[in-house]
């Protein structure tokens, strides 16, 4: 979409404006952003990575955490919100020197469509298409589509298509950072009795007993999970996923956070990550020309 087309669509979407990270966050470098101020919510979306950075329903507190130390620089990951990790999740198993969590989160996506209906519900559609320059990183041609609906809740539709001629292994996650008022009392429910891979213990397989608590570093991969998980605390949120059978739960704890310049020991206790996707044993096997769709809804928990 050209800037002229963007401006034309924005003229029909009064709740959305085009801005950048320099204006909103005072960053030295400029990353293009969409700022949503609707009757339902306030939100900020980065065109780099098609990444929802902030979301706050009207008369509520922020649902998502964006690091006060987030770095806004072209080609660099932005710490917070909902980054899209693909076409692999975590460390690349064939080549650990390749970028962690893939490369689409640090690329500009195409903004395909902007709509706002009469009720002020905003829908943003993004697309990403790999090209030959990506082949050294990932030897399969693919395209992605992401549809983000912002109302009193968040709904994301994620579609991956194999545009090549061979079966494509494709792992991914919506790496959601959720704001918590008090890490010591925050819990994640909905994974009781599930086996998980503990990344703090060399991926040792362990059984979850009760809710997940955050007394120290937590880095766990749960496979073949149910649709719903709940984050208790303030705010309390319900995550409802479809066709995203992996859940990853993460907080670095104070010791690891001290080594992370865009988190530090000052901010590690402000968030938890509960990510949904398809990774490890749940990695998608996408046939040539096949498309696979997953959805994630994030709602207030009652």
Image (cartoon, rainbow, N blue to C red):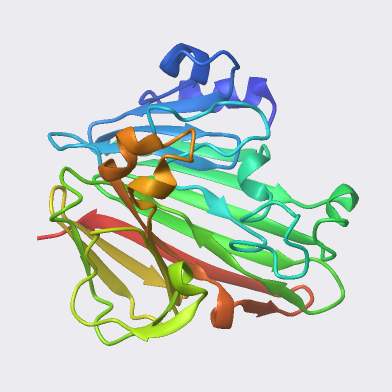
In the rendered image, the quadrant that contains the N terminus is: top right
Q: Is residue 20 visible?
A: no
In the rendering, at what x and y percent does residue 34 appear? 47, 28
Residue at figure coordinates x 51%, y 14% from the top left: 22
Say above or below: 39 vs 128.
above
In the rendering, at what x and y percent does residue 14 appear? 38, 23
Q: Quadrant location of residue 276?
A: bottom left
The residue sitting at the front extreme is 255
Q: Is residue 276 visible?
A: yes
Residue at figure coordinates x 69%, y 64% from the top left: 92
Say above or below: 51 vs 42.
below
Q: Nearer the viewer, residue 259 or 155?
A: 259
The residue sitting at the left extreme is 302
Q: Relative to 111, is 116 on the left or the right? A: left
In the rendering, at what x and y percent does residue 235 appear? 16, 48
Q: Relative to 111, is 266 on the left or the right? A: left
In the rendering, at what x and y percent does residue 249 appear? 37, 64
In the rendered image, the quadrant that contains the C terminus is: bottom left
Q: Relative to 62, is 20 on the left or the right? A: right
């Amino acid at each position: 979409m050209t800037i002229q087309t963007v401006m034309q669509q924005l003229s029909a979407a009064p709740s959305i404006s085009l801005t950048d990270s320099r204006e909103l966050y005072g960053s030295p470098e400029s990353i293009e952003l969409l700022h949503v101020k609707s009757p339902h919510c306030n939100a900020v979306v980065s065109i780099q990575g098609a990444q929802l950075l902030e979301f706050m329903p009207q008369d509520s507190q922020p649902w998502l955490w964006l690091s006060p130390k987030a770095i806004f620089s072209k080609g660099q990951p932005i710490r917070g919100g909902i980054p899209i990790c693909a076409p692999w999740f975590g460390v690349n198993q064939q080549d650990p020197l390749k970028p962690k969590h893939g490369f689409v989160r640090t690329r500009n996506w195409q903004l395909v469509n902007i709509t706002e209906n009469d009720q002020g519900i905003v829908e943003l559609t993004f697309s990403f298409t790999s090209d030959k320059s990506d082949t050294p990183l990932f030897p399969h041609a693919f395209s992605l589509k992401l549809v983000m609906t912002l109302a009193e809740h968040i709904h994301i539709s994620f579609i991956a298509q194999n545009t090549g001629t061979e079966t494509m292994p494709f792992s991914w996650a919506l790496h959601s950072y959720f704001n918590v008022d008090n890490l010591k009392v925050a819990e994640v429910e909905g994974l009781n009795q599930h086996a998980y891979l503990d990344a703090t213990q060399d991926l040792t397989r362990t059984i979850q007993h009760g809710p997940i608590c955050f007394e120290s570093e937590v880095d766990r991969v749960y496979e073949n999970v149910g649709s719903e998980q709940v984050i208790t605390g303030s705010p309390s949120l319900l995550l409802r996923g479809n066709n995203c059978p992996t859940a990853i739960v993460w907080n670095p704890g104070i010791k690891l956070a001290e080594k992370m310049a865009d988190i530090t020991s000052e901010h590690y206790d402000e968030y938890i990550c509960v990510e949904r996707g398809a990774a490890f044993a749940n990695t998608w096997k996408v046939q040539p020309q096949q498309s696979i769709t997953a959805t994630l809804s994030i709602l207030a928990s009652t």
